[in-house]
Image: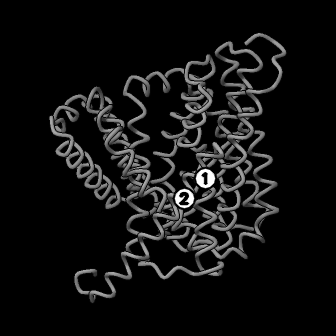
Amino acid sequence: MILAATSSEVARIFLELGAVILGLAVLARVSDRLEVSPIPLYLIAGLAFGQGGIVELDVSEDFVELAAEIGVILLLFTLGLEYSAEELRTSLRRGAPVGGVDIVLNATPGALAGWLLGFGAKETLLLAGITYISSSGIVSKVLRDFEWLGNRETPSVLTTLVLEDLVMALYLPIASAILLGDGAAKAVLAIAVALTILVLVLFGALRYGEILSRLVSARSDEALLLGVVGLTLLVAGLAQEVNISAAVGAFLVGIALSGPVQQRTTVLVNPLRDLFAALFFLFFGLRIDPSDVVGALLPAAMLAGVTGATKVATGAWAAGRDGVGTRGRLRAGTALVARGEFSIVIAGLGASAGVDSDLGPLAAAYVLMLAAAGPLAARYADRRPRIVPQ
């Protein structure tokens, strides 16, 4: 605890954390200049300064780990803020076929790769989730930076992201229960309890979200920020207690908020999210030996090539259902290629449960490749000569 530390120890902690955060700021500026996601740079920094790296940082691991957990919660909370209850209803009504195709095309390669690599059932389940889910953060950045928000294919992309996030809301509690490994009967019971609570909370978020928004609403930005963050952490903690991922609980709180409160909260929370999320990606990299990542490069590259292509096919098919032309379908597909925060969350879940140590390096290498390749592929798709009308 800092309160029990000496003055020199407190000074050292502040110096270390200040240097780490300033280093992340430099990486964020570099990524902004290159017009790419900062996630790969944060992961590389973690690999470089973690165990087996160039220099091992002597930072307060407990603090960084707690900050990383808060980063996951805020990432998922702000992701929930992106969707209104009506958007969820619409996506569930008309996007079910897209969701089914997305699961088959993108989770199956991960499952097959797990089997071919000799992973156990738990690791294979996690790898299927890692390859399935696109990075909502990177995809939304691509849509904003390339000014695609008004394009005809964008609703198809957003529908796919919404469905993936809802699948994750079911996948994470199931994976958590299986990873506990307390026997088949207890696992089934834990899954049943988790899913029941999840359905009830989702129903409440969709039906009574306006009431919750009025309860947390405040004229003061300070009061609104404290109320929303406190509620999010409280729900995340309660979700964790019943074996639902804390991140999923935060996601549902974000969905429940609507109207002006939703818009104000997004503006207030985003800077906090960026700070803690950066620490989350850094911490994930700190826990992985770079030599292990080198050994995982070949299978990660093969997996990235396959699932990059299947994600392009998913987006193109989804946009084609909406009558979008060839170029728009290609934009939709390439926009979805990037993997990022959710894939690392799933890998982190496995690391916490002590699954096969090869999964973490494979996931890190895989995310590094596709988080960088996704925006580049999208930029290339938009610059191709136009062959047919959009």
Indicate whether 367 appears above or below 223: below
Location of residue 97 in the rendering, given as x and y in whole percent from the top left corner: 62, 26
Location of residue 342 in the rendering, given as x and y in whole percent from the top left corner: 54, 51
Give the spatial CA distance, label 2 vs label 1. 6 Å
Name the image quarter holding residue 338: top right
Name the image quarter holding residue 148: top right
- What residue would you read off at disc 2? 26
- What residue would you read off at disc 1? 30
Disc 2 + disc 1, Cβ < 8 Å: yes
The image shows a total of numbered marks equal to 2
Callout 1: SS: helix
Q: Nearer the viewer, residue 314 or 224?
A: 224
Which residue is found at the position 65% from the left and 76% from the top?
A: 289
Callout 2: SS: helix
Location of residue 58 in the rendering, given as x and y in whole percent from the top left corner: 48, 82
Which residue is found at the position 58% from the left and 33% from the top?
A: 145
Q: Nearer the viewer, residue 373 or 305?
A: 373
Quadrant placement of the C terminus:
top right
Q: Which mark is residue 101?
A: none
Q: Is residue 286 visible?
A: yes
Which residue is found at the position 35% from the left and 59% from the top?
A: 240
Q: Amino acid at mark 1?
A: Val
Q: Amino acid at mark 2?
A: Val
- On the picture, is 191 further left or further right than 293? left
Indicate whether 30 appears above or below 202: below
Quadrant placement of the N terminus:
bottom left
Q: How is the image coloured?
A: one colour
Indicate whether 26 appears above or below 4: above
Q: Nearer the viewer, residue 228 or 91?
A: 228
